[in-house]
Amino acid sequence: MKHQTKQFAWSLLAVIASGSLSLAFTKTGDGHQKATTSSTPVTKQEKLLLSEFDRNVKQYLQVREKVRSQLPPLSKDSTPEQIDSYQKRFVEGLRTARGYAKPGYAFTPAVADYIRTIIRTEFKGTDRTEIRQTILEADTTGVPLRVNYPYPETKELTQIPPTLLLRLPQLPKEVKYRFVGRHMLLVDTDNGLIVDYMTNALP
Amino acid sequence: MKRLNAYLLAAVFLIASGVQSTLGQATALQPQRNGGARVVSNSLLRISLPAKDNGVRFGIIGDTGTGTQKQYQLGSLLAQYRDAFPFDFVLMMGDNIYGGETPKDFKLKFENVYRPLLDKQVKFYATLGNHDEPAQRFYQYFNMDGKEYYRFTKGNVAFYSLNSNYMDKKQIQWLESELAKDGSEWKICFFHHPPYSSGGKHGSDKQLREIVEPIFVKYGVNVVLTGHDHFYERVKPQKGIYYFVSGAGGKLREGDVRDKSPLTDKFFDSDMSFMVAEVVGDQFYFQVISRTGETVDAGVLPNQRRK
C-alpha cells in the first residue's frame, strides 16, 4: 500500500513536471464549479485530485448555503451595521454547522502536495522572487492558522499573483485562496471564515 | 537673446503657477483662478479643467481610509474643489478602510470625511484594495452593486472597476467579454495595484500587467487609474495607454518614487494628493492637487483611439 502511494506520488510529480498544468473549472448545471481541462489534457491522476478537491469545496458550499438561507439577505445598499451583523451571524452559523471540520478538509495531503508543486513551478525565476517577498512582507502576523476561525478584519489580504491564480484549481466565487506567510488558506469571501489551510505552500 | 529671455519668463511663469511643463503626450495646462472667489488656505482655488456642460467630471482618490487628520484635510479640500468644479462622482482606488471594518470605522474613515460630498449626492465608486474586505461591495456608499468587479457608464465614458487582489479566470473572462462589446469612446479601468509604478516600496505589479495589459491593448482601453503606492505618478504612456497612480489620499510614502525612473512623466511624493478629471469629447483633462492646495500636475491627453 505504501509502495502504491509512493508510486502514485512520483507519477503525479512527473506529470506536473512535464508542464501539463493548465487547469480550469467550468460551471455545471447546478451553478457549481467542476474541474475540467483547458487546452492541455489532464491526466487521470490529476482528474482524481481535482474532483476530490472540487467535491470537498462543494460540500462546504452546501453547508454554507443552508446557513446563508437562514440569514436576512444583504442588499447592495447595506449599511455598515447590516454588513457587520450579517458577517457575524454568518460566521457563528457556520462554526456551529461545521463543528466537525478539521485541517485538511479541502486541502487533503495529496491535494496540498499537488498545489505546492504548482506553486513551486510558478515561483521559479527572479521575477517570482519579488512576488514571494511581497507575500512574505504582508501584514498577516496574528492570522490564526485554525479552521473555522475568522480571518481578522484588521489584517491585510495578500494579493494572489494573477499568474498563479490561473494555474491553481479555480474556485467558486464564495471562497478564495489567501496567503498568510508561507501558508495558504481557503477563506470564505463574504464572512472571512477560514474554511481550511495548508502549511508551507510557498517554497 | 530675446528668445532665451522669453523661454526663461515662460519657465518662471509655469513654476510660479504650480504646474511644471509636462512631458510625453500630455499638454500642460495652466491653472486659472476661478471666477467665484473660493478660498483654500487663504489662496484662491485654481481650476485647470474646462468644466463644460457636456463634460464627464469626476474626482479620483486612493488609499484613503485612515481616519487621520490629514485625510480629513484632503477630504475637505476635495469638497471645496467640488464647489468650484462640480464633479458628479468620485472613483476610489482601494484601501478604502484600513484596519478594522466595524460600523464605527466606516464612519470615521469614510462617511465623516466625505460627508459634505455625500450630502450633495456625489456618488463614490470603489474598488477593492489589499486592506479591504470583499464585503465592502455591499456598502451603500461604495456603489459596487454587490460585485467585486463591475462596469458603469457616464456619457461617452465606460468605467471598469476591477479587483486586482484576485484577478482570477472568471474576472478576466468577464473583462474581455465586456470590453469586446463596448462601443464607448473612452474606456477607463481603475483598480488598486499599478501595472506601472516607480514606487520603491511596491512599484510595478508585473504579474498583474502580464495578464491585463494584453487585454487593455487589444480592446483599446484609454486610461488606467490605480493606487497602492502612496504618492502621485503620471507614467509615460505604455503601449498607447495612459497610466496614473493616485494612492496618497490618506497615506503618504514620502520620497518613495525611485530617482530617475524611466517610467515617470511626472510625480509628486512629498505630500498627499487627489485628482480631478474631465472627459470632453476626445480630450481627457486632469489636475492633481496636493493637501496644501497646490496644483502639482495638470494636462490634457487626446483620445489615442480616435482616428
Image: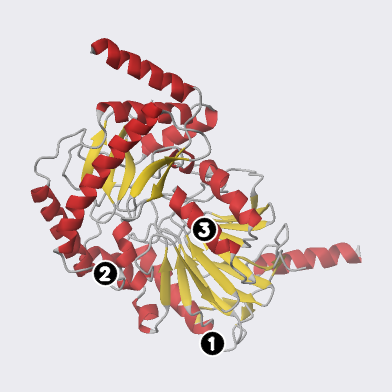
Callout 3: SS: helix
Q: Residues within 10 Å of mark 2 (few under 14, many from 20)?
A: some
Q: Position of residue A44 (x, y in %)?
A: 39, 28
The residue depicted at 41 percent of the width and 72 percent of the height is: B124
Q: On what subunit does the disc labeled 1 rest?
A: B
Depth check, mark 1 against mark 2: the one in front is 2
Mark 3 or 1 closer to N-term? 1
Amino acid type shown at disc 2: Lys
Residue position for label 2: B107
Identify residue for label 3.
Answer: B175
Amino acid carrying label 3: it is Leu
Q: Earlier in the sequence, mark 1 or mark 2?
A: 1
Residue A168 in which image quadrant:
top left
- The tag on residue B117 is none
In front: mark 2 or mark 3? 3
Q: Chain of mark 3?
A: B
Q: Which mark is residue B37?
A: 1
